[in-house]
Amino acid sequence: MSEIGIIEPHDLMLKLPKDGWRLEKGGILSEICVRYEQVGNPLPDGGNIIFVCHALTGDAHVIGYRPGERPGIDQPSGWWEGMIGPGMGIDTDRFCVICANILGGCAGTTGPSSTNPATGEPYGSLFPEITMGDIVDVHRALLHQLGFKRIAAVVGGSFGGMQALEWAIRHPEDMDRCVLVASAATLNTQALAFDIVARHAIIQDPNWKHGDYYKGPRPVAGLANARRLAHITYLSQQVMDDKFGREKREEWLQQGNDFHTQVRRDFKTYFQIESYLEYQGQKFVKRFDANSYLHITRALDSYDPEETFGSLEAAVRNIRAQVLLVSLSGDWLFTREQAGRLVKACLTEGKNISYCHLYAPAGHDAFLTHISELKLVMRAFLTATATRDPSTLNREEAEAFKAFAQQIPEGARVLDIGCGDGTLLKQVALSQRAHCVGLEKELPKVIQALHSGINVLMADIDTDLRHMPDHAFDVSIISHTIQVLRHPDRMMKQLLRVSNWALIAFPNFGYLGMRFSLLFSGRMPRTREFPYEWYNTPNIHNCTLKDFADFCGQFGLKAKLLSCHSASWLGKLLITLGLPNLGADGVILRLTQDESKETLHGQRTERID
């Protein structure tokens, strides 16, 4: 049950210029009413406001009960229950949430079914064409009239994510953070095709009458068919198989012969999936207007910042907000590949971008219905803080981080492969004022890194690095990760494609303690650098410093030994004597392309034993 209670909607008439509100396509509206709902208390400067942009057929009622509903008896009717509230993904104990119905909608904000002041009748066919930019500008005007110029974040899912993206591009000074869930910069061709067919279903309904149907029968058949078609795109094949399969409607099978004859004449079936789609269509026509559906889907289909700016990179160039993009595994309406294009464009332009790909087999609508992981990701990103202050590090950690940080130029663009919880990158960012991005495949660690304020991309480091843009970074860090990679040779080539050089640390299996452990115990050793049993170790490519030197020579790489460390006095002595392969339990190296074919073997003062 929602803890929010009843949320009263508010209607606000925007203060417009004397000649009306001019839309991007040339139309003019002489008045605009915006319906919005608010949860939580805003700070005077708006610094804790999160504006939530709703999806295609959503409205301002994002959380809680509507007036007339009974808390404790009825189910809460907000469309993002569980995501918003005290202690939730968007924490209303900390943030004030505002959500408004969009321009062109039919839930209180001016749209085709609203009264045209010039005629006293619904706009109908006279309602002007709208764009994504118009929708965003009306939201923005609402906030300004409420007294807020800059807010904490704009958040949106699906069509709402496109609004959030457009807002961040057009008005980069308005927000600190921007969240896009199950969304992309444009629709793909398949999604466009579904929208086109859906609109045809409406305009071919004889009751549509070019939009002027408000005094007579409405085009409910066409609108219901449009909704049925769209709803197919919101679910994955897996969830449809699991929920319905080829199950039949038992109540229909028990009917008499006359009923079955009528079913055959109407070309209906007995499948449960048809019953479900029928229900969704009939439910939808009770709350939505066909003209609004036409206008909003056209604005959705037309949205293309790449076309507007010439390239996706040029489009995101103005963004100043920290951006979080979340894609879902079962979503074929907004795919992982589309999300990847947006991430790559932001990386190319040096933007603060984080990305998560969540397991959600239910499909596109999972961002509304299966949010257990999504709300953890959202909360971490929106409440980012320094989870580990440098003063809390133990001596060993502090020395290790310092050894890394002092090798990185101030202000550098840094990529950390296998960044874990982001602690190392956080210290590099703080000490070197570096622009840092981490790659991590484990969701719990991604969430920790997000909460520490690090840009982190959820990715398989063995395969996904190849999708990153060339020379997007000055330096790549690969700390205690090389030994867990499936193909270190391929990774090294990719590292020096995306960055100018790499900083590499790994545990040295040639360390004296390792050798003694194998010699005297006959068992796989366990040390500070190798704290695992043989059966649960993530390390699949253990190597010595000499092995790595040979590796570099074979693949045309140049490695310079920067530092060695050892926990034992004997190891430190051996390092001092120039025997790092014998004395060091861990090493840090600088890796570049080897144009002169020099390797570690050629360094007289750093002989490898």
Image (cartoon, grey):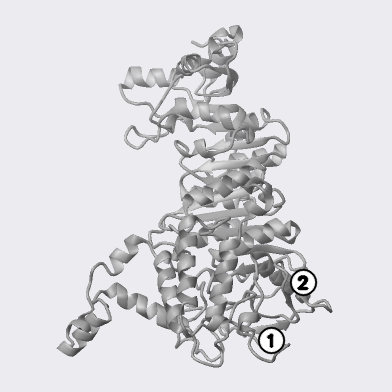
Residue 208 position, x and y percent, is 51, 82
The quarter of the picture where residue 262 lies is bottom left
The quarter of the picture where residue 180 lies is bottom right
> Which residue is rendered at x = 41% and y = 25% of the image?
542
Q: Is residue 282 above or below residue 585?
A: below
- In the foreground, 574 or 54: 54
- In the foreground, 527 or 384: 384
Residue 144: image tag: 2
Which three-letter amino acid code belongs to the residue tagged 2? His
- State how many labels appear: 2
Say which residue label 1 marks: 116
Q: Earlier in the sequence, mark 2 or mark 1?
A: 1
Which three-letter amino acid code belongs to the residue tagged 1? Asn
> Which residue is rendered at x = 29% and y = 64% of the image?
241
Q: Is residue 224 left or right of residue 93?
A: left
Give the farthest residue toward the left: 257
Q: Is residue 218 above or below residue 105?
A: below
Callout 2 touching callout 1 (CB < 8 Å): no
Decide if residue 371 is in sight here: no
Q: Is residue 440 above or below residue 101?
A: above
Residue 442 position, x and y percent, is 46, 46
SS of the residue under disc 2:
helix
Q: Is residue 586 left or right of residue 314?
A: left
Marks 2 and 1 sit apart, C-alpha to C-alpha, by 25 Å
Decide if residue 24 is in sight here: yes
- In the foreground, 175 or 384: 175
SS of the residue under disc 1:
loop
Residue 509 position, x and y percent, is 43, 22
Mark 2 or mark 1, whichever is nearer to me:
1
Q: Residues within 10 Å of mark 1 (few under 14, many from 20)?
A: some
Q: Is residue 410 left or right of residue 190?
A: right
